[in-house]
Amino acid sequence: MLFLSGMAVLGLLFGSFANVLVYRIPRGESIVWPGSRCPRCGHALAWLDNIPLLSWLLLGSRCRYCREPVAFRYPLLELLMAVSWTYLAWLTGPQWLLAEALVLFFLLWVLSFIDLETGLLPDALTYPGMILGLMFAVLTGHAADSLLGLCAGYGIFWLVGRVFLMLTGKEGMGHGDYKLLAMLGAFMGWQALPFIIFASSFVGAIVGSLVLLLARRGVRTEIPFGPYLALAGMVWFLWHEPVLRWYLDLMAPVQ
Ligand SMILES: [Zn+2]
């Protein structure tokens, strides 16, 4: 119990750090200096203004100094990090796999929110992610699966991108998506790729058509693909055993 509550607090703190990354990496700002500031009035935030979730609730979701509303993303990302990290800790217990899971989910949340806000998946996150994925795979004895996952992840999307470009003359996917799939392959091995590609395209197509329907009413149409890849990766990481069993049952010849 102490382990899980500790993980929830740690998740909130890292969620808070994730918010710093989401804001600063696309702007090319340093992630360690200066300390947190209000993006509007530039006032430095005291530690009291900076407690995950609590400050947002106590200050009525506004900056204490200029009363600018604080984006809902701040408490949301803190909460998502805390909930997912606690669940992962409950699922795996203290072992190497947990360390790997925490790093993977941290990167996926940060990348998803950056992609949602800017349409970019920065190399500053995907490249270190690939290296960390390979590193954990070496520690847990899955180095070959991981290396193959990395290369296949990049290669498949690169190939799809080429074909799409030839057929339509347009870039279908961003190169950030290639790198994110490579990172997912490095963390989870090549076995994860078919599900991630299928699930993200399927959900992406459904949401995409809904958005196109709404677009006539003036909703912006371009939606980034990164969050679908990230979510599909999370689902595979958490539930690949039941997913695999369901898939094999489906494919099994009828008796
Ligand atoms: Zn302010």
Image (cartoon, rainbow, N blue to C red):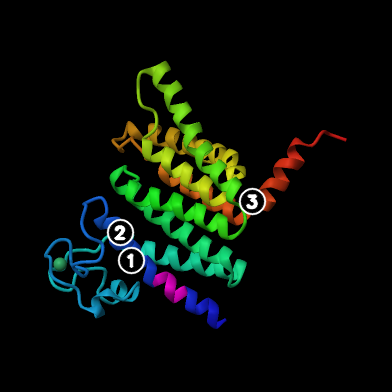
Image disc number at residue 155:
none
Regarding residue 72, the answer to whether it shows in the image is no
Image disc number at residue 240:
3
- Label 2, secondary structure: give it: helix
Please name the amino acid that badge 2 sits on: Leu
Regarding residue 42, the answer to whether it shows in the image is yes
Rendered residue at 43%/74% (across/down) = 10
How busy is the neighbourhood of tag 3: few (under 14 within 10 Å), some, or many (20 plus)?
A: some
Residue 49 drawn above or below residue 104: below
Residue 4 drawn above or below residue 154: below
Task: Report the front residue among 136 and 110.
Answer: 136
Whether 9 is among the magenta residues is yes
Q: Quadrant of ligand 1?
A: bottom left
- The x and y percentages for residue 203 are 51, 40
- The x and y percentages for residue 61 are 26, 68
Whether 11 is among the magenta residues is yes
Name the residue that disc number 2 marks.
21
